């Protein structure tokens, strides 16, 4: 297979050099207690670093109490957050992965249900989606928030992080200031660029040795207008799509199929202003990601959901084992858990969010023996069980009436909106259960009255196999 050299090339983001251009972008994990990262959070990020990601941008941290999106949002303004950053850095940086944090304030976009704390924004313009009615910030309060961004940046720098991303995407607070439809102010912050430039200046002054970037929504006219005014203050721009304030546009933040893959690729042109561009949104295939970089549409790619599914994706790409990557099916189980307030999970990777409690693939088999495991039914649940048993070195037999695997996945895959999910799910298990790996034997039963053939005796484990 052709080497994906563009994807694997190093990239300089100001003072930080990424070992490759595959990025785990900021996403909420709910692995947070009392607004601080848990040990599960540390292990989750460490797994993606061990898998070879070039950059991890930790999930959004609030710069002030008024910016806490949910009860599980990290607080970047706590002194004790520095200790959490250090634990994460100790798990991530030894692998060569750079570690950034995203500084966040949602403004009028507040997910938590009533009764809410007071909601603030640039002006008193409500959010349609969350039914919030914000109060416009006073001038001195905006100045205090600018200082809070600086303080959070200083905590990140003191803890040894490599960079800071400020989010002005998805209609959150910074965009509420630079979007003229949401900013009705008559003070100096009525200038669309005033707040964002002061914030970036404060971050740069507080963390002069760190890379500084700005996340923007590539499909936002306000973002396209503001980008030329801030490009001299940043080392990179990170482009996504979607807007939090409406249900229709919020699906673009983490869009499922049938949204086209690589959705931001055609929107990056206006943001090619002399600094590297990191593009994200439905970039899940390594070959497509490499082609996107080769085309000049972006310099690095956010493959967040792909890395939730298979943290080892970068390492497999570097080893020329792209065919062994477990692919994201786009079901958004990861997003559903966040909105339910439960820890991140993945329908294809049972270890996502459970890195401390579930053994790695192949680590749970019996020592010195191979057991025969019989799985009845080659639907999604049966396939998952068979794949896990096979990875542990067991002799697996799958009994299935149909002529092919997939079960109900083949049924719901007939619906156009679910075709990609079903096709990718079946392809994942065809790869994991490939008989060429010499671990699995299949017995397909296609007639209710037919008894399965006698099974061969279990094979002895190979000396080099882990069982």
Image (cartoon, grey):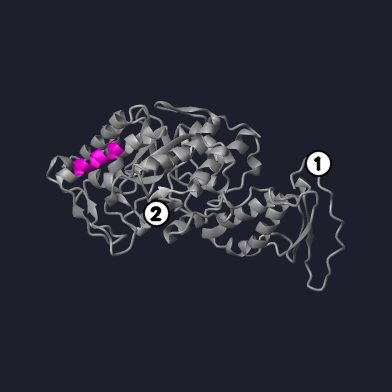
Residue 6 percent across, percent down from the top left: 53, 30
Stretch in magenta: 142-151
Seen as rendered, the residue at the extreme bottom is 449
Is residue 56 in view from this perspective? no
If the image is split into quadrants, where does the N terminus sit?
top right
If you read the primary sequence from the N terminus, does the residue marked by circle 1 or circle 2 appear first? 2
Q: Is residue 144 magenta?
A: yes
The residue wearing badge 2 is: 72
Residue 4 figure quarter:
top right
Q: In the displayed structure, does residue 95 sit left or right of residue 176?
A: right
- Residue at 21% x, 42% y: name it: 144
Q: Is residue 97 magenta?
A: no
252 versus 463 height, above or below: below
Q: In the displayed structure, does residue 332 sit left or right of residue 442?
A: left
The residue wearing badge 1 is: 463
- Residue at 28% x, 61% y: name it: 116
- Residue at 41% x, 51% y: name it: 252
């Amino acid at each position: 297979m052709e080497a994906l050299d563009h994807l694997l090339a190093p990239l300089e983001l100001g003072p930080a050099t990424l070992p490759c251009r595959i990025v785990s972008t900021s996403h909420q994990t709910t692995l947070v207690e009392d607004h601080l990262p848990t040990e599960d959070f540390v292990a989750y990020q460490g797994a993606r670093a061990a898998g070879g990601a070039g950059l991890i941008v930790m999930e959004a941290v609030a710069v002030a109490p008024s910016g806490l999106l949910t009860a599980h949002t990290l607080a970047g303004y706590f002194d004790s957050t520095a200790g959490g950053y250090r634990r994460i850095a100790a798990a991530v940086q030894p692998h060569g992965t750079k570690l950034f944090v995203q500084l966040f304030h949602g403004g009028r976009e507040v997910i938590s249900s009533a009764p809410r704390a007071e909601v603030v924004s640039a002006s008193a313009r409500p959010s349609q989606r969350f039914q919030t009615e914000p109060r416009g910030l006073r001038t001195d309060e905006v100045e205090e928030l600018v200082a809070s961004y600086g303080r959070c940046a200083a905590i990140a720098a003191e803890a040894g992080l490599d960079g800071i991303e400020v989010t002005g995407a998805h209609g959150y607070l910074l965009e509420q200031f630079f979007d003229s439809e949401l900013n009705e102010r008559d003070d100096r912050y009525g200038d669309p660029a005033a707040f964002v430039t002061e914030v970036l200046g404060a971050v740069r002054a507080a963390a002069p040795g760190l890379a500084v970037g700005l996340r923007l929504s590539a499909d936002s006219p306000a973002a396209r207008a503001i980008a030329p005014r801030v490009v001299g203050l940043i080392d990179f721009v990170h482009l996504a799509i979607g807007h939090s304030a409406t249900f229709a546009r919020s699906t673009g933040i983490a869009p499922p199929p049938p949204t086209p893959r690589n959705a931001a690729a055609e929107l990056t042109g206006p943001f090619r202003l002399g600094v590297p561009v990191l593009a994200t949104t439905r970039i899940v295939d390594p070959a497509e990601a490499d082609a996107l970089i080769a085309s000049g549409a972006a310099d690095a790619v956010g493959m967040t959901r792909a890395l939730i599914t298979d943290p080892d994706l970068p390492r497999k790409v570097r080893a020329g084992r792209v065919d062994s990557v477990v692919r994201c099916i786009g079901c958004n189980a990861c997003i559903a858990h966040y909105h339910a307030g439960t820890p991140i999970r993945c329908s294809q990777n049972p270890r996502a969010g459970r890195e401390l409690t579930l053994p790695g693939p192949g680590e749970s088999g019996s020592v010195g023996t191979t057991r025969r495991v019989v799985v009845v039914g080659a639907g999604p649940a049966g396939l998952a069980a068979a794949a896990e048993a096979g990875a542990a070195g067991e002799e697996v037999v799958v009994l299935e009436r149909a002529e092919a695997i997939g079960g109900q996945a083949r049924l719901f895959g007939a619906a156009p909106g679910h075709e990609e999910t079903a096709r990718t799910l079946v392809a994942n298990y065809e790869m994991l259960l490939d008989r060429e790996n010499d671990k699995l034997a299949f017995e397909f039963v296609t007639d209710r009255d037919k008894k399965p053939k006698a099974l061969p005796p279990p094979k002895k484990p190979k000396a080099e196999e882990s069982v």
